[in-house]
Image (spheres, rainbow, N blue to C red):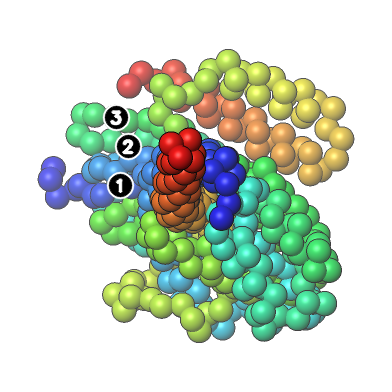
């Protein structure tokens, strides 16, 4: 088991959000969901607002991460995110409100840029709502 | 010699000024500590970002990309970070001097001023101040930095400006802050240092290299800007602390000088009074 462990770092502009170890992590890049084990090929990819799950043995940690990119090396995964939150840090009411706002905007989709922005906001809100269900 | 009352009045006025400068010194000491720990927390993100972008660019030397190509226009955008308030020694004027005395031509510059003092100084000197965002320096947030950054990048992408510079005060330590100018875009590939070990790994990019650059370079610029903002806040408070410290000790010097003068004046007035009384008594005796 010990051979499968690699380093994980999640860094945001305001703090080092998480540093630790994992044997498996899940996240979503612009290309879609992906899971990373040790000795993954080196890869750099932008991520979309998503739930990041970090598995270490039986333990699972979940965080909401918005916009940034991930750098995967064979023995290390680094996520540079603009915003990252643990379930306990999420303001669920605000996320719900943001979700409703975004859905409203998508309904009367005025022009393309607004749709993109609303979709992005919706993604963020849904990620937050999803992640806040997990207990630490 | 000035009268006793004049000296006394002057002394008490300086004493109250000293109280103010001393209080300001204490306030900026506390603010400095906060700003400093914040700057330290920002560092890992910034360093990692720099490392990633550096190794990306080092491996793609000849790539044709909008953020790397030679500028087509002489116009240059300069983001200048100063404070909103004065009384910080040479903090603001050093920044303004660095831009004004630098090799950049005045006509070519479009100033994006963060902080009132810089905006005022450049307007007075006749620079074209495109935007002034005084709030950003009060409590820098990443979101707001990203907002400013996207506006500057838009001007760059539209071809309004060909180069982007960032001017801020680098926080070396509590007593020494260095005004610094760095070129943000186009990224100077030749100046980037890469560890040998890093470049050996063959990195893959998703969806592809160009799109990854498209997305990462704006983030890189934003993180530089945000890092500079946070550092500038620390520098401002450091500069103010030093300035107020020397103002307080100057006031101390003047006060001790005035106390000496006051005592001398008091002594001489007593002597004079005594002489007068003795002379008067002598006259009565006779």
- Answer few, some or many: residues within 10 Å of disc 2's Cα (few below 14, many 20 plus, some between 14 and 19): many
Looking at the image, residue B49 lies above or below residue B57: above
Q: Nearer the viewer, residue B286 or A106?
A: B286
Looking at the picture, how far across and down is residue B5, in whole percent? 57, 40
Residue B203 left/right relative to A98? left
* Cα gap from disc 3 to disc 1, whole angstroms: 13 Å
Looking at the picture, how far across and down is residue A25, in whole percent? 34, 41
Determine the chain carrying the residue at label 2: A
The residue depicted at 64 percent of the width and 72 percent of the height is B97
Residue projecting furthest to the top: A93
Secondary structure under tag 1 reads strand
Residue A21 left/right relative to B86? left
The residue depicted at 69 percent of the width and 20 percent of the height is A100
* Disc number placed over residue B175 in the picture, else none: none
Quarter in which the N terminus of chain A is drawn: top left
* Disc number placed over residue A54 in the picture, else none: 2
Disc with the residue nearer the chain's start (3 vs 1): 1
Disc with the residue nearer the chain's start (3 vs 2): 2
Please name the residue that numbered disc 1 is placed on.
A8
Quarter in which the C terminus of chain A is drawn: top left
Do the CB atoms of the residues marked 1 and 2 lie less than 8 Å apart? yes
Residue projecting furthest to the right: A110
Determine the chain carrying the residue at label 3: A
The residue depicted at 81 percent of the width and 62 percent of the height is B123
In the rendered image, residues at marks 3 and 1 fall on the same chain: yes
Please name the residue that numbered disc 3 is placed on.
A60
- Answer few, some or many: residues within 10 Å of disc 1's Cα (few below 14, many 20 plus, some between 14 and 19): many
Do the CB atoms of the residues marked 3 and 1 lie less than 8 Å apart? no
- Answer few, some or many: residues within 10 Å of disc 3's Cα (few below 14, many 20 plus, some between 14 and 19): few
Secondary structure under tag 3 reads strand
The mark closer to the camera, 1 or 2, is 1
Q: Is residue A43 visible?
A: no
């Amino acid at each position: 088991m010990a051979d499968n462990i690699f380093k994980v770092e999640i860094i945001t502009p305001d703090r080092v959000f998480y540093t630790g170890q994992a044997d498996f992590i899940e996240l979503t890049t612009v290309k879609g969901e992906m899971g990373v084990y040790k000795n993954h090929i080196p890869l750099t990819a932008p991520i979309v607002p998503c739930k990041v799950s970090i598995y270490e043995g039986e333990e699972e940690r979940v965080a909401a991460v918005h916009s940034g990119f991930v750098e995967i090396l064979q023995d290390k995964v680094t996520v540079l995110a603009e915003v990252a939150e643990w379930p306990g840090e999420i303001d669920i009411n605000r996320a719900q409100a943001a979700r409703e706002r975004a859905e409203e905007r998508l309904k009367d989709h005025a022009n393309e840029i607004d749709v993109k922005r609303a979709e992005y906001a919706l993604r963020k809100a849904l990620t937050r709502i999803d992640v806040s269900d997990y207990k630490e | 010699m000035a009268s006793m009352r004049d000296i006394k009045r002057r002394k008490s006025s300086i004493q109250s000024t000293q109280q103010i400068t001393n209080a300001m010194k204490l306030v900026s000491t506390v603010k400095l500590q906060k700003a400093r720990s914040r700057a330290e927390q920002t560092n890992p993100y910034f360093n990692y970002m720099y490392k990633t972008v550096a190794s990306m660019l080092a491996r793609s030397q000849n790539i044709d990309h909008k953020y790397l190509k030679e500028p087509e226009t002489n116009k240059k955008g300069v983001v200048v970070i100063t404070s909103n308030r004065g009384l910080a020694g040479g903090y603001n004027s050093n920044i303004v001097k660095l831009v004004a005395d630098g090799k950049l031509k005045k006509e070519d510059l479009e100033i994006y001023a963060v902080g009132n003092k810089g905006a005022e100084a450049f307007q007075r000197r006749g620079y074209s101040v495109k935007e002034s965002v005084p709030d950003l320096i009060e409590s820098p947030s990443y979101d707001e930095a990203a907002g400013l950054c996207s506006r500057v990048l838009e001007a760059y992408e539209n071809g309004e400006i060909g180069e982007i510079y960032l001017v801020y005060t680098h926080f070396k330590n509590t007593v020494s802050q260095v005004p610094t100018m760095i070129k943000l875009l186009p990224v100077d590939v030749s100046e980037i240092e890469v560890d040998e070990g890093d470049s050996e790994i063959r990195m893959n990019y998703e969806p592809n290299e160009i799109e990854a650059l498209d997305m990462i370079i704006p983030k890189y610029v934003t993180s530089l800007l945000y890092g500079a903002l946070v550092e500038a806040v620390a520098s401002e408070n450091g500069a103010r602390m030093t300035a107020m410290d020397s103002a307080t000790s100057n006031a101390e010097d003047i006060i001790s000088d005035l106390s000496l003068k006051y005592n001398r004046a008091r002594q001489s007035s007593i002597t004079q009074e005594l002489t007068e009384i003795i002379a008067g008594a002598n006259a009565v005796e006779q």
